Image: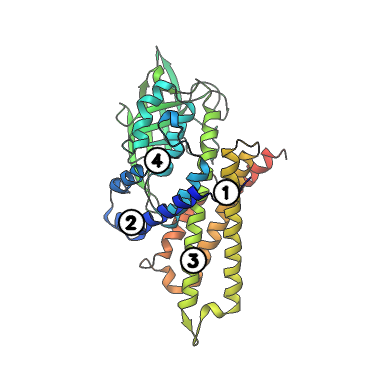
Amino acid sequence: MLLVLSEEQRLLAKAAADFVAASDSLKRLRKLRDTGAPRAYSPELFAQMAELGWTAIPFSEADGGAGLGLAEVAVLLEALGRGLVPEPYLSTVMLGGSALALGGTETQKRALLPDIIAGTKLSTLAYQERGSRYELSHVATRAERAGSAYRLSGEKIQVLDGQAADLFVISARSSGGQAERSGITLFLVPRDAPGLSITPQQRIDSRGAALVALNGVELDEASVLGGVGEGYSLLERVIDRAMVAISAEMLGTMSAAFEQTLDYLKSRVQFGVAIGSFQALKHRAARMFIEVELARSLVMAAARASDEGLPEARLLSSAAKARCSDALMLVANEAIQMHGGIGMTDEHDIGFFLKRARVAELTFGDAAFHRQRFAELSGF
């Protein structure tokens, strides 16, 4: 397994870094938060990302995509994570789009994927429910037969970018008990479906989410994504890929927070010398560096394993998410402490990194959950 970037990947990384720098992402994030922008991102910048071909990266050429893999997605998202870019790449491309690409019929893909790849239609995955604690099989939302159609009733929480999504991939139970893996079916539900209610939310990292309530939403057979009652395996594949993607974003976030802290240690003078010359702070900075580099190796390994179809891909996905969750929280907390009092103020940008860390840590499962999953997948 090659754990270095190819020439094409280095060019992608450079282009993404230039894009983030030109967008002045941290000032933009602050403005989006302070003005209460309803979409919580810039449609114009997301359209630019699509024009650059980034939304096409993980989709096959047959589906109109670039035919690349998670390694390229990881390169892109690391750059976006450095700038805390809020555009809905993770939700539209890696959640809703991936579910459609992996489980959709040719008819469904021809009808929906071109707009997703073009960035003109936003999609997301609505799978979490109250009390689910990251378990994909915890599905209480019901899909009951109504003649030749299905009637969906229930509620989904923490739907990423649900406030702006045009299309939802929603998990519902068509048979079986609440925690069973069998009997889960995925449905394609448009935003304007009668009976669908969306309550916008803003997370502490200033990004958008939503509560999605289904009150007798009626759908026909053409809305079923994958086989009836066979949605769990598809859901698991989608989340496994998304875990690698968000781990790469977290890698970028911790790298930027560490670099900003290092710059502060070199420039902040106390007792006539830069505080970075104090041995205790040197030791803490060295630990931060080690954690970032260990996270980098695991993210690259997880992405490569998925692209190459290796049997340990699922293990590495959980290992990467667990490591990045712990490392990002360590780096973000240390960054606030090393910045001292100014780090606690809203005027300083470093606080945005801690807020994003708190949300990303819990997305798709925290470190404890993934250590347990790693153990179970390993046969313990």
Mark 3 or mark 2: name the one nearer the start of the chain: 2
Between residue 235 and residue 98, name the one nearer to us. 98
Mark 2 or mark 1: name the one nearer the start of the chain: 2
Mark 1 or mark 4: name the one nearer the start of the chain: 4
**Element under disc 1:** helix
**Element under disc 3:** helix
Apparent side of residue 212 relative to residue 174 in the rendered image (left or right): left
Looking at the rendered structure, which numbered label has been put on residue 155? none
| Type of colouring | rainbow
> Residue tagged by mark 4?
55
Q: Residue furthest top?
A: 147
Callout 3 amino acid: Glu
Callout 4 amino acid: Thr
**Element under disc 4:** helix
Query: Vertically, is 328 above or below 157?
Result: below
Q: Residue 301: x and y, percent?
A: 60, 47
Q: Rounded to the nearest whole Å, what is the CA distance between mark 4 and mark 2?
A: 18 Å
Callout 2 amino acid: Ser
Looking at the rendered structure, which numbered label has been put on residue 300? 1
Q: Rounded to the nearest whole Å, what is the CA distance between mark 3 and mark 4?
A: 28 Å
Q: Residue at x 44, y 73 (%)?
A: 341
> Residue tagged by mark 2?
23
Looking at the rendered structure, which numbered label has been put on residue 259? 3
Q: Residue 216: x and y, percent?
A: 36, 24
**Element under disc 2:** helix
